[in-house]
Image: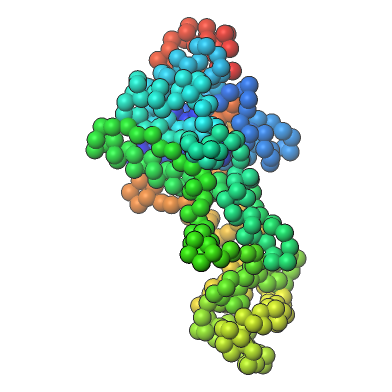
Amino acid sequence: MKVLSGIKVADFTWVGVGPWTARHLAHHGATVVHVETSRAPDVLRLTPPFKGGRTDVNKAAYHALYNSNKYGITLNLNHPKAREVALRLIKWADIVFESFTPGTMKRWGLSYEDVKEIKPDIIYFSTCQMGQTGPRAKHPAFGTQLVSYAGFTYLTGWPDRGPTGPYGPYTDTLAPPLGATLVVAALMYRNKTGRGVHIDLSQFENALQFIGPVLMSYILNGEIYERVGNRDPQACPHGAFRCRGDDRWIFIEVWNDDEWKALVRVMGEPEWASDERFKTFRGRKENEDELERLIEAWTITKDAYELMDMLQKEGVPAGVVQKGEDLYRDPYLKSLPYYWELEHPEIGKHHYEGPPFKLSKTPAKLEMPAPTLGQHTEFVVTRFLGYSDEEFVEMLQEGVFE
C-alpha cells in the first residue's frame, strides 16, 4: 500500500503545472481521474514530440509524461448535463484540482464556493499564472511568458547582449513540488479538523521565491542584478568549458582558494597558474577572460566524463553538460531506476520519468501509462460514479462525454 492509497482526486487541470502536481499524488497511491474534452484538447496533446513524428492527440510524449498513473475521461462541461456528472465526481473525490483562468470553474458552477456547499470538507486546489485575485488574475498565459514577467529572462544571457531566457516554461517546473506539498498539508489539516480548504497557488508568486537575492538587493540597496552569462560574483572560474569531441562541455566552479589549488593540481601545476594575476580571488576575477581562455586550452584536450571524475575526486565542483541522450543513458539514473517503461495504448513501449524522491516504506510506483483521450470514461462513470449502463449510453449519445 502506498502512502496516499484511498485518496481520490478529481483532476480538472490541463497543460503543465496542474497535471504535474496531481501526478505526484497519483504516483504515491491516490486514485486520480483526469478530466478533458475532445472539443478543446489539452495544449500538451498538441505539443511535440509525437510518436511517429505526426500530430496526434494520443501520441504526444509531453502529455503522456505529465499524466501517468491517472484515469482519463472526456466531459463537455458546456453541456447542460455535464455539471451533474462533474458534481458527482467531486462528491466522490477528496481533492479537486483545477488550473484554468480564474472565473472558468465559476461559469460551470464548479467554483470552490459552489463545491463546498455540497462537500464542506473538500480540498480545492487552484493554480494559475497570477492567482485568483488581483489586477492581472484573469490574464491567460503560459509559463513561457511568466519566465519573463517573473524576472528570469532579464537575468539570463550575456552582459553585452539582450535577454536570452531560460529554456522553456521554467516557472512550470517550480510550482508542482510546492503544490503537492500544500495538498498533503491540507490533507493533514482535514484529518485533524474535519474541515476543507481552498489552496490558491499563484505561479508568479511561487517563482519569485527562487530569485530572492535579486529582490532583496533592490529592496535593501536599490541595486539591479544584470546578466553575467555563466559567471558568478562569488566564484572564479565559474563557467562552461569545451572538452574533446563534438560539442562536449564541462562546467567548473571554484569558490575558495582550496578548490583553486585542487584545480591547479589536476591541471598538472601549469606554469601560468603561479602568475601573480591568479594568486588571489580578486586577481582571478579581474583577469577572468584570460583565466577562462587558459583553462579551456587544457579542458579541450580532455574527455568530459573522465575530467569530471578527476575534478570531483579532488573536491572541485564539476559536471558534464549533458544532452538528452546522455541523460537517458546516465548510469546513476539507470541505477535508481529513474525511467520507468510502460506500454501505452497508442505510443507503445514508452519511458516515463519517475518520482524525484523516494519514501522508504511506501515508494512510488508507475503502474499505468497516461490515458488516451477519454480512455476510461465508461469505466469511471459507471464504476466510480455509479451511473447505470443505460444512463451512460444515453448521455454519451447526447454529447455529454465529448
State the image coordinates of residue 88 (x, y, percent, origin top left): 41, 18
In this view, the residue in front, 315 or 84, is 84
Q: Residue at x 62, y 70 (%)?
A: 231
Query: Quarter of the image holding residue 92?
Result: top left
Pick the quarter of the image with the C terminus: top right
State the image coordinates of residue 208 (x, y, percent, origin top left): 51, 52
Q: Residue at x 34, y 23 (%)?
A: 119
Q: Residue furthest front?
A: 222
State the image coordinates of residue 220 (x, y, percent, origin top left): 48, 64
Residue 323 is left or right of residue 65, and the answer is right
Pick the quarter of the image with the N terminus: top left
- Residue 232 in sight here: yes
- Residue 252 in sight here: no
Q: How many marks?
A: 0
Query: Quarter of the image holding residue 328?
Result: bottom right
Q: Residue furthest left?
A: 192
207 is higher (above) or lower (below) than 92:
below
In this view, the residue in front, 125 or 244, is 125
In this view, the residue in front, 169 or 85, is 169
Residue 174 is left or right of residue 247, and the answer is left
Query: Quarter of the image holding residue 63?
Result: top right
In this view, the residue in front, 249 or 135, is 135
Q: Residue at x 38, y 34 (%)?
A: 198
Residue 171 is left or right of residue 357, and the answer is right
State the image coordinates of residue 111 (x, y, percent, origin top left): 44, 25
